């Protein structure tokens, strides 16, 4: 049985500013590094075979922290795990978007990657990964705007809840079907939230 632990990267300064990142390469904020360490502590309780991650620095840094603290090997980066491309929206805040394109900016074609294109990237990645690591337990560090449509595809519904930074979602392949046994879980951040 193949098991995937889908992880959204830790918080970045741009996340804190409400700035659309997309495929722009932004590092973790200090709180994002702490989130990654707390997640690593949680992941030590289960045995994972390896980690694969997006090649963008925020995902790579999250994956490297998890690998360092758990001993789970980082097997490599893959650009197919990159965040959704957001076209002209990348680098903008909500105020920027409203100022440039008006309140209806969501309805405009501003070059955002379509779900079908994103899912084609995921399907190609998954096919190669299942060939190389069949039956393994893998952590996949990626991005919220990438993981959400992938989950929606398998669950048959839109993911209404915002995927939190360093959230863990677990998918297991049982015969020919994928099942979600954990969704958007951030129990490891409890002490961080209590301290806030």
Image (cartoon, rainbow, N blue to C red):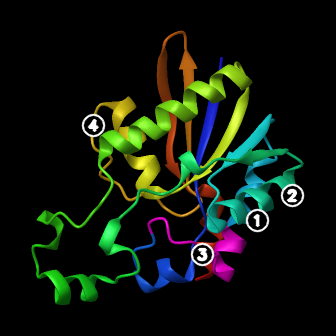
Neighbour class for label 2 at 10 Å: few (<14), some, many (≥20)?
some
- Dot 4 corresponds to which residue? 157
Q: In what element is the residue under mark 1?
A: helix
Residue shown at the point (72%, 24%) measured from the top left: 132
Q: Which residues are magenta?
A: 22-35
- Of discs 4 and 3, which sits in the foreground? 4
- Dot 2 corresponds to which residue? 69
Quarter assignment of residue 84: bottom left
Residue shown at the point (71%, 19%) measured from the top left: 135
Counting residues from the N terminus, which is met first, the one under dot 1 or under dot 3?
Answer: 1
State if disc 3 and disc 1 touch (CB < 8 Å).
no
Specify the label residue 194 is tagged with. 3
> Residue 39: within the magenta?
no
The mark tally for this picture is: 4
State if disc 1 and disc 4 touch (CB < 8 Å).
no
Counting residues from the N terminus, which is met first, the one under dot 2 or under dot 3?
Answer: 2
Quarter assignment of residue 151: top left
Counting residues from the N terminus, which is met first, the one under dot 4 or under dot 1?
Answer: 1
């Amino acid at each position: 049985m193949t098991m995937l632990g889908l992880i959204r990267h830790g918080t970045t300064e741009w996340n804190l500013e409400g700035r659309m990142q997309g495929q722009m390469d932004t590092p973790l904020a200090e709180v994002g590094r702490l989130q990654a360490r707390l997640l690593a502590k949680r992941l030590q309780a289960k045995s994972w075979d390896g980690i694969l991650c997006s090649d963008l620095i925020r995902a790579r840094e999250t994956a490297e922290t998890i690998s360092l603290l758990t001993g789970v090997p980082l097997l490599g980066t893959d650009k197919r795990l990159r965040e959704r491309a957001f076209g002209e929206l990348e680098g903008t805040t909500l105020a920027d978007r409203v100022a440039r394109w008006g309140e209806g900016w969501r309805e405009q074609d501003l070059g955002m990657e379509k779900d079908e294109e994103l899912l084609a990237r995921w399907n190609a990645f998954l096919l190669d990964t299942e060939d190389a690591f069949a039956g393994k337990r893998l952590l996949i560090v990626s991005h919220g705007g990438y993981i959400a449509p992938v989950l929606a595809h398998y669950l048959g519904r839109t993911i209404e809840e915002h995927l939190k930074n360093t959230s863990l979602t677990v998918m297991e392949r049982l015969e020919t079907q994928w099942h979600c046994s954990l969704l958007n879980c951030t129990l490891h951040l409890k002490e961080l939230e209590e301290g806030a």
